[in-house]
Image (tube, rainbow, N blue to C red):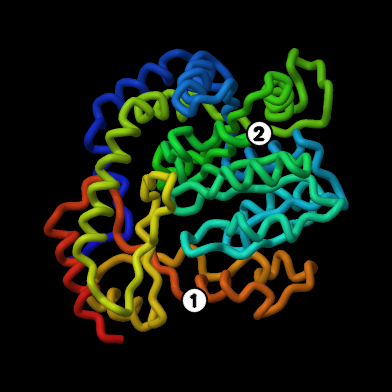
Amino acid sequence: MKIQANNLKRQYDLHADEYAKKATEVLSSGWYILGKEVEEFEKEFAGYVGANHCVGLASGLDALQIAFRLIGIKEGDEVIVSSNAYIACVMGITMNGGTPVFVEPDEYDNIDATKIEEKITPKTKAILAVHLYGQACDMTTICDVAHKYGLKVIEDCAQSHGTTWKGQMVGSVGDIGCFSFYPTKGLGAFGDGGALTCKDKEDADNARMIRNYGSAVRYQNELVGMNSRLDELQAGLLRVKLQYIDEFNKERERIAAYYNENIHNPLIRPLMTRPGSNNVWHQYVIHSPKRDELIKFLNSKEIGNIIHYPIPPHLSNAYKYLGYHEGSFPIAEQYANEVLSIPMYNGITKEEQDYVIAALNSFKG
């Protein structure tokens, strides 16, 4: 049996007719940029998240870059971020001239909120809470620390559409939430896309100007902006998919629960879910001290797998200039050598899961 690490077509097939109808509707409208589909999606997604405002953008990275610009991050400013976050999180900081200050992850694979305060300096301006793999960071501690020191809190929700912290949707807890709609995400588009959510109307208005060349009125450019617009077609298709996101998340929770109940191998540790958070299981991540051997074993069984992520940002060539080296953040480096994502997608069958589970349980290293 051959099993893909991800299979987007199975989710698509569930509502294929609705996507086709919406695509035809948008294409036949003759209006493809910043029209009613984007406007309606922004209202609907803000309502889903529980945020005051939503601004549709071209990607999740653009959302991060704009978010840090909105809070005034500039050269010399420091932003605290998890050392095992995806590199795009760090890029959102440095593209504005800021400096990332890394904090190691905890046993839940997200930033260890108890270690943030010790990294705060007079240059610290914000904390980036990256809700990795589908569950929330400890937002209570993060927000308490931020309030104590007068810091902004940016949430990276790229992998956590529908995740809650103590009943409140991520993306509405901090000052600004950043979302990606890359096709593999919980709310995935059929191409690139992103959005930011926020409490403050001025932030939303400025984000809308930034995304459209710094212009609120055509040919009147109030600031130096960029071209980062969620297009009408993607917005329309996302509106269809948004109706079913809770259904998709519940299915993934059932899939994860079945893995949790049936994977029994001392060489494999499944991802733990933090008390206070649900988990929408963007990825089903396991840790193994024999990860590389496990990859070869799964490949021999034709079971798809992906490493999220093999190189921590501080060891990437892009951030050599920060001066870090192997051993600078040992927990993140250990996780990078241990983590592996196994097949997790809407529509995976019990037979396929049983095949994956049997393989994992038979792995001897």
SS of the residue at dot 1?
helix
Residue 102: where, in percent of width, then height? 69, 62
Q: Is residue 45 above or below residue 107?
A: above
Q: Is residue 212 visible?
A: no
- Position of residue 77 in the picture relative to residue 85 (left or right): right
Label pair 1/2, CB-CB below 8 angstroms: no
The residue that label 1 is drawn on is: 337
Disc 2, SS: loop
Where residue 332 sits in the image (x, y, percent)? 57, 69
In the displayed structure, 104 sits above or below 250; it is below
In the image, 94 versus 137, the foreground residue is: 137
Mark 2, other Cα within 10 Å: few <14 / some 14–19 / many ≥20: many
Residue 109 visible in image: yes
Which x, y percent locates residue 110? 53, 57
> Which disc number belongs to residue 175?
2
Work out how far the residue at label 1 is from the one at label 2, CA to CA, in angstroms.
33 Å
| Residue at 34%, 65% in the rendered image | 270
Q: Residue 143 placed where, x, y %?
A: 64, 41
